[in-house]
Image: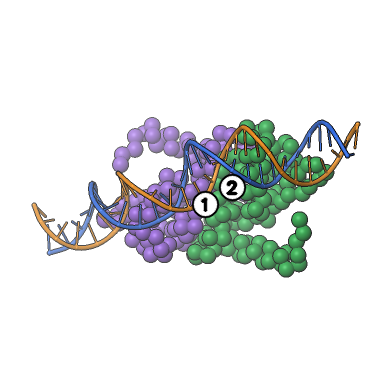
Chain colours: A green, B purple, C orange, D blue
Amino acid sequence: MHVTKSQAKELRRELQEVSDCCSQGLRSPIGKSEADLLAPILKAVAHPARLQLLSIIALNGQACACDLTAPVGLSQPTVSHHLKILTEAELIHREQRGQWAWFHINKKRMKDISALFAV
Amino acid sequence: MHVTKSQAKELRRELQEVSDCCSQGLRSPIGKSEADLLAPILKAVAHPARLQLLSIIALNGQACACDLTAPVGLSQPTVSHHLKILTEAELIHREQRGQWAWFHINKKRMKDISALFAV
DNA sequence: TCGATATATTGATATTTATCAATATATAAA
DNA sequence: TTTATATATTGATAAATATCAATATATCGA
């Protein structure tokens, strides 16, 4: 999976944009476009299985997919699906290690969400 | 809408339970029951219109429903529906003032969510 | 008590989401 | 190169969600 320079730049720009939305918390007014940017990220964490997965990955900063199916009690394809949603929301990041998929926590995203709800 | 003493006690217990889940952040492992408790609260904020509504209410700590329909560009019943969801998740609290409904931010809940994602 | 206004509820519909079984793909090991 | 294992994708289905029009309810003011 190759990422071009301009795609990487776009990614960084969007990451920054999310941070900018969050940094002031909910007390600075959130417009429609910011809400549309943030809602999918929050939607990603708003599911019991995904919360558990995120928690396990956050525990050591990373976890192997092979250790993530049992704890949530769902089928392998379903867990794979949830991991994809977390990855697309950039809450975690996927790395291939041999035949295993490792997922790393994105602390920045977590901080962003934390800041959004800080009083 | 009357609340009995035992209902109030139950409410306080559940509020405390949510706080307990959140206080350690996601890095202490989240079990299924905790995930089931937290997910509906996160689901409530995971919607663009509800994020905007929460933001407007948070801005001054409170807001009248009469000022909440226009900014999100949805019908009055739909906004009423979203406010109900935020209220049931106890992110806001409803107060009747004459013919107007006022909604107050629940800072504790906000802090809980913030703590959950704190690194 | 009656009309006006603010908000909530109901009922219907379209869309999205969660889930699994079956299958495909990718990597490592023999 | 074949086989085994880990993970992803597809396709189908059931359930949940978002939305609005129509209507109900509640409160104020006359």
Amino acid type at circle 2 is: Val
* Secondary structure at numbered mark 1: loop
Find residue B36 and report its horizontal and vertical position in percent. 54, 37
Q: Residue at x 65, y 53 (%)?
A: A88
- Left/right placement of residue B74 relative to residue A88 reads left
Residue B85 visible, this angle: yes
D10 or B56: nearer the viewer = D10
- Chain under callout 2: A
Find residue C6 and report its horizontal and vertical position in percent. 29, 59
Label for residue A6?
none
Residue B11's image quarter?
top left
Q: Residue at x 59, y 54 (%)?
A: A41
Amino acid type at circle 1 is: Ala
- Left/right placement of residue C9 relative to residue A2 reads left
D25 or B98: nearer the viewer = D25
Kindly report the distance in space between the C-alpha atoms of the residues bearing marks 1 and 2.
9 Å
B29 or B47: nearer the viewer = B47
Q: Which residue is mark 1?
A: B46
- Chain under callout 1: B
Find residue A105 and report its horizontal and vertical position in percent. 70, 49
Near mark 1 (Cα within 10 A), the count class, few <14, some 14-19 or many ≥20, is many
Q: Which residue is mark 2?
A: A45
Q: Residue at x 44, y 49 (%)?
A: B86
User: Are dots 1 and 2 in contact, CB under 8 Å?
Assistant: yes
Find residue A116 and report its horizontal and vertical position in percent. 57, 57
